[in-house]
Image (spheres, grey):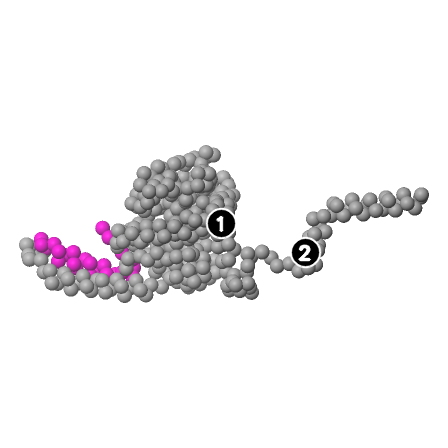
């Protein structure tokens, strides 16, 4: 059974009508299928889908990103990679089923694949905690990322989470520290890392795994520090003002590409990724191959610096310093500051020298 969003009612009515026409055993008994009528309605459906999805407002984009039928991380892992070997446990506490991780083959080469998995139905969503990772999930991914770094294996992550798990137990067991260490680990890796935001990229739960050389995003995905409902509740004390919040947060792929928070938009089929899974698989694979190729001729130090410069440059174009004047983003220092630093550096030697001069002066004076 197809699931429809509240702004897709016209599309739903047309698709219901076309399904009835395709069924020869309708209410009037056995009848001939009217192929001309079906073709006319199909053209109308295609036109309506194009019209609706080309004019989505930010809140409607959020709803599409959360669509129940949207392809999840498990779907991409099963269909893009070969010989996937899932690995479990953080070696401290336990296993987190909201994140899938393991080594696999991609286009004949070894990669580490990490995917935040929401689940396909109610039972699997409860089992996966709706894609909200706990601290053991972050520690598991840290363990595996360090292992991939040791053996020079590129890392691919699929981001789809409303955020980190907000329960008391997660905080008691050090979730904030786990997220911080995950970000630190991602930033210190010397292998290429590519993140693909396939649905929701929410809060620290997303950035913990998306601190990558390349951040790619499906055209109807979202990436934000908080949900629109949470933002509206904090700023306006009204959770119904989700549209205003979504507009202000600039959480769509188009907005984030303009702000240079992400590096590339992967186009979805008209009507969302769930309407043509084969096409979205093809588009994601092409993008991953293209971006991995960019790092083939880079050494470890260049890969590390590429990632650091990427994040240090975010927001600089809108500030007081133009991008062309940034250089290597180190703080500019005047002559007095440099002189002070030199003195601090050689303070011990200076004190010894001054002490020696004073002692010699006393000896010469008494002689």
| Quadrant (top left, top right, bottom left, bottom right) of the C terminus | top right
Magenta highlight on residue 25:
yes
Q: Residues within 10 Å of mark 1 (few under 14, many from 20)?
A: some
Task: Return the disc, 2 or 1, that comes first in the chain's sequence.
Answer: 1
Determine the CA span between mark 2 and mark 1: 28 Å
Could you tell me residue 36's position as x and y percent? Answer: 11, 63
- For numbered disc 1, what is the local secondary structure? helix
Q: Which mark is residue 302?
A: 1
Q: Which mark is residue 338?
A: 2
- For numbered disc 2, what is the local secondary structure? helix
Q: Is residue 176 visible?
A: no
- The quadrant in which residue 115 appears is top left
Image depth: mark 2 or mark 1 in front: 1
Q: Is residue 82 visible?
A: yes
Magenta highlight on residue 297:
no
In the image, taking residue 240 as reference, residue 320 lies left or right, namely right
Prevailing SS of the magenta stretch: helix
- The quadrant in which residue 60 appears is bottom left
Q: Bounds of the magenta span? A: 1-26
> Residue at 88% across / 46% down in the picture?
361
> Residue at 9% across / 60% down in the picture?
34
Nearer to us in this view, 327 or 221: 327
């Amino acid at each position: 059974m197809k699931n429809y969003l509240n702004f897709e009612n016209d599309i739903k009515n047309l698709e219901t009508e076309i399904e009835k026409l395709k069924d020869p055993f309708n209410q009037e008994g056995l009848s001939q299928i009217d192929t001309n009528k079906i073709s006319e309605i199909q053209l109308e459906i295609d036109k309506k889908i194009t019209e609706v999805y080309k004019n989505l407002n930010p809140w409607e984009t959020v709803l599409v990103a959360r669509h129940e039928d949207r392809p999840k991380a498990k779907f991409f892992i099963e269909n893009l990679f070969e010989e996937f070997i899932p690995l479990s446990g953080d070696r401290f506490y336990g296993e987190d089923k909201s994140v899938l991780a393991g080594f696999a083959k991609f286009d004949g080469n070894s990669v580490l694949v990490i995917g935040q998995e929401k689940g396909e139905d109610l039972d699997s969503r409860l089992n996966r905690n709706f894609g909200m990772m706990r601290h053991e999930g972050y520690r598991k991914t840290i363990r595996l990322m360090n292992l991939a770094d040791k053996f020079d294996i590129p890392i691919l992550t699929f981001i789809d989470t409303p955020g980190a798990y907000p329960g008391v137990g997660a905080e008691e067991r050090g979730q904030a520290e786990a997220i911080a260490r995950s970000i630190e680990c991602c930033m210190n890796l010397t292998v290429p890392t590519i993140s693909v935001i396939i649905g929701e990229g929410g809060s620290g739960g997303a950035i913990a795994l998306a601190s990558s050389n390349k951040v790619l995003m499906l055209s109807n995905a979202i990436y934000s520090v908080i949900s629109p409902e949470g933002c509206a509740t904090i700023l306006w004390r009204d959770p119904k003002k989700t549209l205003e919040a979504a507009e202000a947060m600039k959480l769509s792929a188009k907005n984030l590409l303009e702000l240079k928070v992400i590096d590339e938009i992967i186009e979805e089929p008209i009507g969302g990724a769930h309407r043509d899974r084969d096409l979205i698989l093809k588009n994601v694979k092409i993008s991953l191959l293209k971006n991995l190729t960019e790092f083939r001729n880079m050494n470890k130090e260049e890969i590390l610096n590429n990632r650091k410069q990427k994040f240090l440059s975010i927001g600089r174009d809108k500030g007081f310093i133009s991008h062309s004047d940034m250089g290597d983003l180190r703080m500019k220092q005047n002559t007095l500051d440099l002189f002070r630093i030199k003195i601090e550096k050689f303070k011990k030697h200076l004190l010894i020298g001054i002490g020696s001069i004073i002692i010699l002066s006393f000896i010469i004076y008494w002689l």
